[in-house]
Image (cartoon, rainbow, N blue to C red):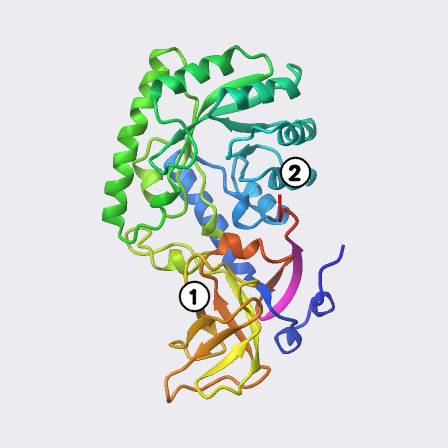
Amino acid sequence: MQLGPNQSLIGSRDFAERLATPALIVDLDALESNIRKMSSLVEQSGRKHRPHVKAHKSSLIGRRQIDAGAIGLCCATIREAEAMAAAGLSGLLVTAPVVTPSSVARLAQVRAQIDELMVVVESDMAIDALMSCLSADRPVDVLIDIDMSMGRTGLTEPSEAVRLANRVAKAPQLRYRGIQAYYGHLQHVPTLAERHERVAEQWRRLSGFIHALQSAGLKPDIVSGGGTGTYHLDLEFGPFTEIQPGSYIFMDKQYGAVELAPGGSPFKTALNVAARVVSVVQPDRVIIDAGYKAMATDAGPAMVASGAAADATYQFMGDEHGALRFTDHALRPKLGDLVRLVSPHCDPTINLHNQIHIVQDGQLVDIWPIEARGY
């Protein structure tokens, strides 16, 4: 397997001096601590968790999550489900509606490889497509997708959820299991009190769907939703049987600005983007080799983790370049120096890279492929 230009540095303690950049760096101890911590919190709550692959897109990380107690993995894309299934990981939930014949055919191939596969539906077209490609001998579990005021996907009326759940329950190729109710738009509400107030409003909305389904003899065995930003509330107060956190394994600038739980976040920043200073010509900045193609741009600029003054400000300067600006008295890194940045948003940052460089005790111990990139 090709592991990129830094493969020869595995086992090296001076890897940072020779590291080809930009590169994703993950602290193994922090990663494993985050995985263990979430599993422990979920177990204490008496609930379950099905972490999101979209945060890492790596079967090696997915396997660690399952080994630590996760009941399976959420997959935002067909490609993620294919990659996890190819690695022998089961308990997969495809969290986005699948309606096209080509996508459903790919799902059927995934189902042939693993014992447990779930999908969400919100339309008759999706149900018809699934029924056309699947066999009653290997049915697929189905969750009805509910809109939690995101305005993205999911049903808005309890009566429609009941109607579709009835259709699913009668289809021999499908097994009705419950509902998905995800509120991604509330994951980054800054204060815990405001976030609690806003998710509680959605729980009340969700209770109407659950009551309607129960009244129709379609009580949901699974209520899946929640995420990293709401995990504390979801586990302590929410209506979920299982939660779908993803970013907790890495953390990023967005989640660093969120009051996750009383007493602070139990999760550590495990992911950095490593870059090198490639120009010092400008008097008020240095230029590094990490721009739009190295980091997500939807959550503002990156933050300096190490290698430059903590108050240095990052600025995107194009596809391949970024700038670090400094105060007048700040010590500037030199040409060729390595700088580590905290990603603005970890999920789409991961999707820009082919490998994760795994570091432990100052040594590059391994390089893991990000095999579930793309669609």
**Badge 2 amino acid:** Glu
Is residue 142 placed above or below 31 in the rendered structure?
A: above
Q: Tell me residue 218's x, y (percent).
A: 41, 14
Location of mark 2 (residue): 82
Q: Which of the pair 342/232 is nearer the observer? A: 342
Residue projecting furthest to the right = 1
The magenta-colored residue range is 362-369
Most common secondary structure along the magenta stretch: strand
Location of mark 1 (residue): 301
Q: Tell me residue 103's x, y (percent).
A: 63, 32
Query: Pointer 2: residues within 10 angstroms few (<14), some, or many (20+)?
Result: many
C-alpha distance separating marks 1 and 2: 33 Å
Q: Residue at x 64, y 67 (%)?
A: 364
Can residue 219 be spotted in the picture?
no
Q: Tell me residue 314's x, y (percent).
A: 44, 72
**Badge 1 amino acid:** Pro
Q: Residue at x 65, y 63 (%)?
A: 365
Q: Residue at x 60, y 41 (%)?
A: 80
Task: Check whether the beta carbons of the residues at disc 1 and disc 2 lie within 8 A of each other.
Answer: no
Q: Earlier in the sequence, mark 1 or mark 2?
A: 2
Tell me if residue 365 is in the magenta stretch: yes
Which image quarter holds the C terminus?
top right
For residue 278, which quarter of the picture? Answer: bottom right
Q: Which of the pair 35/342 is nearer the observer? A: 342
For residue 236, which quarter of the picture? Answer: top left
Which image quarter holds the N terminus?
bottom right
Can residue 294 be spotted in the picture?
yes
* Left or right: where 232 falls relative to 108: left
Is residue 364 placed above or below 115 in the rendered structure?
A: below
Q: Which of the pair 42/187 is nearer the observer? A: 187
Query: Pointer 1: residues within 10 angstroms few (<14), some, or many (20+)?
Result: many
Is residue 339 placed above or below 84 in the rendered structure?
A: below
